[in-house]
Image (cartoon, rainbow, N blue to C red):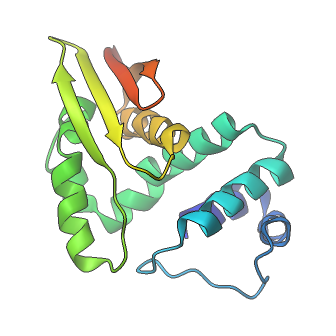
Amino acid sequence: MCLAELVEKQFGHDAWQQVLEAAGVPATRKFLMIETTSDSDFENLLLATGQVLEWSEEQTSRAFGEHWCTVFAPRLYAQYFKRVTNAHDFLLQMNGVHGRVAQGVPNINAPAFEYEDGGPGRLVMKYCSERNLEELWIGLIQGVGKAYNERLVINRLAKNKVEVLFAGPA
């Protein structure tokens, strides 16, 4: 699981064990890459990670998003990262990516996105999901920028809507 890898890589195995304990998850629990973790379990693990590491929800979400998009997802979904050459085009393909991934992962509840192209260097994205993972979504957008070595400025327009400005190389 991506979150376990992030915590163990940066803080060690003991820190991950503390996260599991804080989330009420048995220390022997193993997460498989092809397994879908329930939203409530994932949210508990994310909150527990923040508590153990003394990070805010925003810090935890952003760290997860960066790790997901720069380390974890490129190993699992390399073809989607190679298909495009920049963060803008990667973000625009997310509905199609989620649709294809959902075919092979049981019980996935992927979000959908609506887009407004605001001209050169600007994209407005709307997160469409009942899962309320907006902070995580923003962290993932930041991670996409890092994956493509681009500096993205993200301005929140509403709870589920952001403006992404593509501000050049990182």
Give the answer, above or below, for where 12 lies relative to 126. below
Side of 72 relative to 103 (left or right): right
Residue at point 51% right, 46% down?
Answer: 133
Instruction: Pick the quarter of the image with the N terminus.
Output: bottom right
* Residue 14 in which image quadrant: bottom right
Taking 117 as reference, is 13 above or below it? below
- Counting from the top left corner in percent of width and height, residue 24 is at 80, 73
- In terms of depth relative to the viewer, which is nearer, 13 or 110? 110
Q: Position of residue 57 (x, y in %)?
A: 69, 40
Residue in the image at 63% along x and 69% along y: 41
Q: What percent of the width, then of the height, locates residue 115?
A: 20, 30
Relative to 95, residue 157 above or below: above
Q: Is residue 149 left or right of residue 28?
A: left
Name the image quarter holding residue 144. top left
Residue 77 location, quadrant:
bottom left
Using the rendered image of the protein, determine whether residue 113 is visible from the camera's viewpoint.
yes
Total marks in image: 0
- The single residue placed furthest to the front in the displayed view is 130
Q: Nearer the viewer, residue 46 or 66?
A: 46
Residue for point 57% across, 39% down: 62
Q: Residue furthest bottom?
A: 28
Give coordinates of residue 109: x percent, y percent: 37, 64
Give left or right: position of 149 versus 71: left
On screen, residue 27 versus residue 126, left or right, reads right
Quadrant placement of the C terminus: top left
